[in-house]
Image: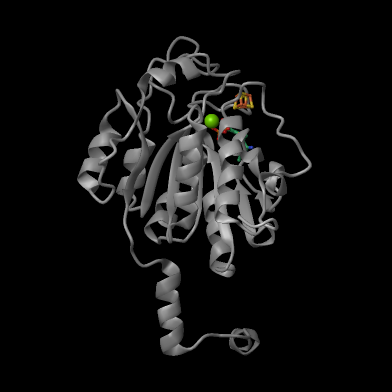
Amino acid sequence: MSDTALKVADYKSDLKPIWCAGCGDYGVITPFYQALVEVQAVPKDTVIVSGIGCSGRFPYFCNTFGFHGVHGRAVPTAAGVKLARPELTVIAVGGDGDGLGIGGGHVPHVARKNVDLTYILIDNSIYGLTKGQSSPTSPLSMKSKTAPYAYVEEPLNPLQMFLAYNASFVARGYSGKPKDLKDLFVQAIRHRGFSVLHIFSPCVSMNKEITFKTMNEIVKPLPDDWDPTNKLAAFEKAMDTGTFWTGLVYREERETIHDRLDAIGERVGRYQDLTELLKRFR
Ligand SMILES: Cc1ncc(C[n+]2csc(CCOP(=O)(O)OP(=O)(O)O)c2C)c(N)n1
Ligand code: SF4
Ligand SMILES: [Mg+2]
């Protein structure tokens, strides 16, 4: 890398992360900075859009453009940014409550449209910011502020969902393995299409049942000879609830919505100036 290459310090903002000491999210942001270095993302051409939650604070700590939006709307907002300005690198970040609860209805549509952005879902199986309510990924029987005896709802399986949504890049990581996360971020950002990275990141303050210790026992990297083009095999790994398989689970190259819109633009022409068009509706 040349002397003028961007370094980790170039991607850190003046604000130091204010997550609780020991929060898994530190293990997400550190490799994320390193990945930005590896792809040499240009800060002025990079946008990080987040939802609400502890994880939603991400853009504050990055020296890029950022948008801390409305709860559950990180992914559709990021899609709007990318559709309006396709030359930008766009990254959406949010928690399990944000992207699987209140915002759960948005993700399949951005995935099926194959909008060219990266979605980082930081899952701690709890609503961290609001101090410990059960979330869509809290396991059955887990106790929380809203389930003091036991959670009685079946959890969602995000990996299975993203595969079923036809996301063109589906990966899984763990904040206890930041080195592996860096590589996954690089691959996700370089992927052309909708790339989603499901990251388990323990909440040390509000979720006392799923900890680094319990996660370390079930996290396992995918085998070295894993074939990420085999979707049925990917589903099998996603359905294995006893092991938390990490790595690039599935990837396919397919046309993005941008390719298809460009093709129509080539055929019928593009509006450079909308004034004439809008006059028709006066
Ligand atoms: C429309 C709306 N409903 C509810 C809230 C309250 N709220 C803020 S963050 C949050 C959940 C956060 O959980 P998660 O998305 O898992 O993020 P974490 O804090 O765990 O990273 C909720 C319910 C809100 N801000 N806006
Ligand atoms: S409440 Fe949990 S998720 Fe939020 S900063 Fe603290 S440890 Fe992290
Ligand atoms: Mg959460």
Quarter occupied by the N terminus: bottom right
Farthest residue in the front direction? Answer: 2
Quadrant of res 94 = top right
Quarter containing ligand 3?
Answer: top right
Instruction: Write the residue at 52% across / 14% down.
Output: 208
Instruction: Look at the picture and state if 189 lies above or below 248.
Output: below
Q: In the rendered image, is residue 107 in sight?
A: yes
Residue 143's place in the image compared with 2, above or below, is above
- In the depicted view, which residue is nearer to us: 42 or 82? 42
Relative side of 51 to 180, left or right: right
Quadrant where the C terminus sits is bottom right
Color theme of the render: one colour
Residue 196 image offset from top left, x and y in percent:
44, 47
On the image, the x and y values in percent for residue 178 come to: 51, 33
Relative vertical location of residue 139 with respect to residue 28 in this rendering, above or below:
above
Q: Is residue 54 above or below residue 139?
A: below
Judge left or right: residue 27 versus residue 139.
Answer: right
Q: Is residue 244 left or right of residue 268?
A: left
Which residue corresponds to the image point at 29% horizontal and 23% vertical from the top-left?
A: 242
Q: Which residue does the image show at 51% across and 41% down from the upper left?
A: 182
> x, y percentage for residue 219?
38, 25
